[in-house]
Amino acid sequence: MTFLPVAAISVFTIVIIALIVALTIVLIVMVIFGNKEKKKADKAQKQLEEAAIPTTLLVIDKKHMRIRDAGLPKMVVDNIPKRMRRNKVPVVKAKVGPKIMVFMCDAKVYDILPVKQEIKAMVSGIYILSARSLRGPALTAPAKKKGFFSRAFGKKQAKN
């Protein structure tokens, strides 16, 4: 008894079709998972913004540190998943009134924070959401250095 193939398809074609189907399924799952995570992040950000209060801070020091080495409260460290505790986060040590406290902040906010200056910040718990200058010029991020390739092969600016 012999089976006649309906259509002559090579093994290579079958493997390629199977890979395309598998990659399509993985892509769909990732999109669905990503949408759920984005909704969670938006909800958490909204809660942070609702609980934010304006505070005057004197920034003492800022560093990228591991969470467990940053000096954050034990309750905060325990609530962070174990796999995330090795990651480095932007940490700011600041004086709030007579107290010296450790804050976490977003990378965008971290870049504009001046060291050894007073700022007006929106703080939610131990998280700095935004900052602006209390005295003097507005806070701006420092100019990024040009890399080797952009200096060597980038467009030349015309001299006036």
Image: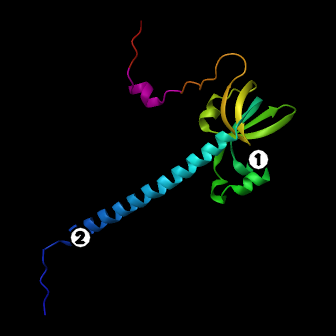
Distance from disc 1 to disc 2, alpha carbons, whole Å, reads 55 Å
Q: Which residues are magenta?
A: 145-155
Query: How is the rendered protein coloured?
Result: rainbow
The quarter holding residue 20 reads bottom left
Identify the amino acid type marked 1: Leu
Q: Looking at the picture, tell me which residue is in the foreground, 9 or 12.
A: 9
Q: Position of residue 2 (x, y in %)?
A: 13, 89
Identify the amino acid type marked 2: Ile
Q: Looking at the picture, tell me which residue is in the foreground, 25 or 64.
A: 25
Question: Which mark identifies residue 134?
Answer: none
The quarter holding residue 114 reads top right
Please report the residue visible at 73 percent of the width from the left and 57 percent of the height from the top: 78
Secondary element type, mark 2: helix
Q: Looking at the picture, tell me which residue is in the foreground, 7 or 68.
A: 7
**Looking at the image, which residue sits at the far bottom?**
1
Please report the residue visible at 68 percent of the width from the left and 55 percent of the height from the top: 80
Q: Position of residue 89 (x, y in %)?
A: 65, 44
In the picture of the structure, the residue carrying the numbered disc 2 is 14
Going by the image, does 27 lie left or right of 74?
Answer: left
Going by the image, does 138 lie left or right of 95?
Answer: left
**Which of disc 2 and disc 1 is earlier in sequence?**
2
Question: Which mark identifies residue 72?
Answer: 1
Question: The C terminus is located in which quarter?
Answer: top left
Please report the residue visible at 53 percent of the width from the left and 50 percent of the height from the top: 39
User: Is 94 drawn above or below residue 157 in the view shown?
Assistant: below
**Looking at the image, which residue sits at the far front?**
50
Q: Magenta stretch containing residue 24, yes or no?
A: no
